[in-house]
Amino acid sequence: MKFLLNLLLPAVILFAAVAQGAEVKSVTSPGGNVKVNVSVGEKMTYDLTFNGKTVLNPSNLGLTFKGMVPMGAMKIVGASSQEINETWENRLSKKSTYVNHCNELTVKVAEIAAPFRELAVIFRAYDDGIAFRYVVPEQAALPGVFVLTSDDTQYAFTSDWTCWASDYKRFNTEHEREFPEMKLSAIEDQSCCVCPLVVAGDFGYCALMESDLLKWAGAQFAAVAGGNKEGVPCTMAIRLTPRADGNGCVLRETGAKSPWRVITLGKDACGLINNSGIILNCATPCVLEDTSWIKAGASSWDWWSEGNLVLNTDTLKARIDLASQNGWAFTTLDDPWYFNSKFQYKPEFLTDTAAGCGTIDIPTAFAYAKEKNVGIFLWMHYQDFDFCGHERTFTAYEKWGAAGMKIDFMNSDNQERVEWIEDVVASAAKHHLMINFHGMYKPTGMERTYPNHITREGILGNEYNKFSKRITSTHTATLPFTRWLCGPGDFTPGGFVNRHPEHFYMQTKLSVPTADEQGTRAHALAMCLVTDSPCLTICDKPENYRNAPGFSFLKNIPAVWDETHAVAGEIGKFYLHYRRSGSKFYAAAITDFEPRTLQFTLDFLKPGKTYVAQIYCDTPESGGTGETDAEKIAELTKEVKAGDVLEIKMVRNGGWTAIFTEK
């Protein structure tokens, strides 16, 4: 590999001599507001500034290899730079056009003493964040194959800032927890905070994430060894999930590249949401030759509303009708569709014969779905999937006419599982099958590389309303600023048995065929618009939607967008945004347990045009103390123009939505 200095970008790389003989190279974003300095000497570090404010003090870089001490004193042996400025289209995302504009710096270093190991780091500076990754070059010191025991990247913040962290304190999890507000010093050295780690400081806001996680171990965040002290600058570190076979964290051949370590930046919390798309821009571009068969859309669903026992051919047909009648592309047939009549797992029902499971006539159901132009996603436990064989299962489901699979309970991001995930989506694509992973780690841009990976869970979603009180309005007002920064999350919104917390019924048995949702009816509708998921699973049963006030909002609801813009919000308190699909605009707002009034300027509408606004909002009674008051909703129609200001009034746990159609 050659590292050449691009003399066409002298402003991007600066050379300087610093104390103790270290060399410094710098890269600045195209707009000049983001700058990274990379220092190489006794150790390798980087620091980060945003709009002239320090985000990170000098922070360690490096990798540790099995059986070796960490890299010693180093020198720079090569450097190159380039400007990247490209535009690409994405019809399966929250916006249709992405601009990948950054300045890139590659620095190659080598130890000055034996064993003379070499390492390269690639930095990208965007106007709204940075990304960097390691490359382990082919070299005599690491012949052929290496085992990585740790990623030694650190994040040296300038204070004990406020953050929002989802901490498991263990590896191999389903990534389904809240993101509570805390201080950085509350994170321990044995923590496992999943992506993203969101931090607010005097510089604004930042989110620590990763992109292009392929053939590597997933990253969590923790305090540096020994922890951080309260009230003083805190340094965070990366913890890689260990391999299942116990052989370190990563086993690769030299020449391999790590995932990108991503830090997005914003002046305020909404700035993180309005990011240019660094996660997807850094992901490996699509490797599929043909993606024309991949389709986004809403999906009806059986499991949440019906429980695990009320499942038969008629209930499946009802879900197909619900989707067909309302412009939804799919229905999802969930656990336990392949039980036998005694509700015992029978994996032989999953493939080959398509005989059904005693309660569902599978051939009849698929013929009915085809007639109604509705695709079916089939749920499967990953262990049953392995038992039946991937190719055997894909071949059978393609023959049946399935749209895709919902594969569940992997609950790990170790290297073996990450490789398993990629193998599954690559193999599924050969059979024109989409994949929705549940029991799954956070997104890292794979939906760009394999667009048939249509969505994933890895989120504390609406299903928890069935058996917990955790899906509060505070949690839902936190998700846009945290989990959804990483990418799609199958939250499964849309419950119509709406209750305030004091009347919320938590199921004690999953077999009970009903489920409540915390918040008002308007809040439930807004969450269908706030949720980022190209397969938008809408959770409730046909009986609860039939003639229900507010349901017309969900008819023909898009699942992907041409444009998304966060307008206002505070993490865990409220959120307001708008989206565009073709010529129509959609807007949604949610609030926490506090009533809230917002002023919404319609500056995104076309000047000189009149729009009809269909508004779905709380009534004053929606915040009442009666058991069903939260289900009360108003539906209004109003003509508006660009620049008009709408007043949004939300009751406690409330919401607001609107559709703007050009007249």
Image (cartoon, grey):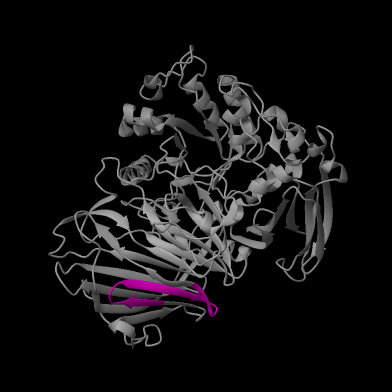
Image coordinates for residue 285, horizontal then vertical, percent: 38, 59
Kindly indicate the quadrant of the structure image that contains residue 299.
Answer: top right
Kindly indicate the quadrant of the structure image that contains residue 586.
Answer: bottom right
Q: Is residue 38 left or right of residue 318?
A: left
Please name whichever residue, 281 or 271, is drawn nearer the observer in this view of the structure. Answer: 271
Image coordinates for residue 71, horizontal then vertical, percent: 24, 66
Image coordinates for residue 508, horizontal then vertical, percent: 62, 24
- Residue located farthest toward the right when viewing the structure as drawn: 620
457, above or below 510, in the image: below
Specify whether residue 281 is in view. Answer: no
Please name whichever residue, 287 or 4, is drawn nearer the observer in this view of the structure. Answer: 4
What range is drawn magenta here?
A: 37-55
207, above or below 173, in the image: below
Image coordinates for residue 347, horizontal then vertical, percent: 38, 22
Is 499 colored magenta in this rendering? no
Q: What secondary structure prevails in the magenta region?
A: strand
Is 40 colored magenta in this rendering? yes
Image quarter (top left, top right, bottom left or bottom right) of the N terminus = bottom left
Image quarter (top left, top right, bottom left or bottom right) of the C terminus = bottom right
- Residue located farthest toward the top when viewing the structure as drawn: 342
What count of labels does the image hold? 0
Please name whichever residue, 483 or 513, is drawn nearer the observer in this view of the structure. Answer: 483
Specify whether residue 477 is in view. Answer: yes
- Residue drawn at 48 percent across, 53 percent down: 195
